[in-house]
Image (tube, rainbow, N blue to C red):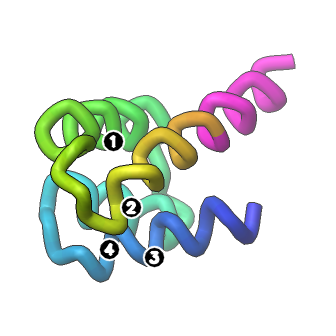
Amino acid sequence: MNELKEIMEKFVSSGWDLIATPSQAWLDGKENTDELISAIKEADAECGNCGCELDPLYKKALELLTNEKEKEDE
């Protein structure tokens, strides 16, 4: 969970509203995991290969969020 928190903090500090806003909501405990996953997927599609430090974080965040969601659904 710490890794996911660190990723969300990086997304917030990016200043890119697409991922910063839902990431901040997640950090504030007001998460909507489906909205967050959707935003990260969109960010990955738009910017996932630009070479910035966030590129690998999109995929890692999606993996961690999906695993977390699956555990909740059990």
- Which residue is under mark 2? 23
| Disc 2 element | helix
Residue drawn at (75%, 23%) of the image:
70
Q: Are marks 2 and 1 in contact (CB under 8 Å)?
A: no
The span from disc 3 to disc 1 (Cα, nearest Å) is: 13 Å
- Which residue is under mark 4? 12
Which residue is outermost to the bottom?
13
Residue drawn at (45%, 76%) of the image:
9
- Which residue is under mark 1? 40
51 w.r.t. 48: above or below: below
User: Counting other residues with Cα less than 10 Å from the Cα at mark 2, is it few (<14), some (14-19), or many (20 or more)?
Assistant: many
The span from disc 3 to disc 2 (Cα, nearest Å) is: 7 Å
Q: Nearer the viewer, residue 45 or 18?
A: 45
| Disc 1 element | helix
- Which residue is under mark 3? 9
In reply to whether residue 35 is colored magenta, the answer given is no
Horizontal side of 6 relative to 25 (left or right) equals: right
Residue drawn at (13%, 62%) of the image:
17
User: Counting other residues with Cα less than 10 Å from the Cα at mark 4, is it few (<14), some (14-19), or many (20 or more)?
Assistant: many
In reply to whether residue 68 is colored magenta, the answer given is yes
Give coordinates of residue 45: x percent, y percent.
20, 31
Dividing the picture into quadrants, the one containing residue 24 is: bottom left
Q: Looking at the rendering, in which quadrant would you find the C terminus?
A: top right
User: Counting other residues with Cα less than 10 Å from the Cα at mark 1, is it few (<14), some (14-19), or many (20 or more)?
Assistant: many
**Between discs 3 and 1, the one toward the N terminus:** 3
First to last magenta residue range: 64-74
Q: Are marks 2 and 4 in contact (CB under 8 Å)?
A: yes
**Between discs 2 and 4, the one toward the N terminus:** 4
Dividing the picture into quadrants, the one containing residue 2 is: bottom right
Badge 2 amino acid? Ser
Q: Are marks 3 and 2 in contact (CB under 8 Å)?
A: yes
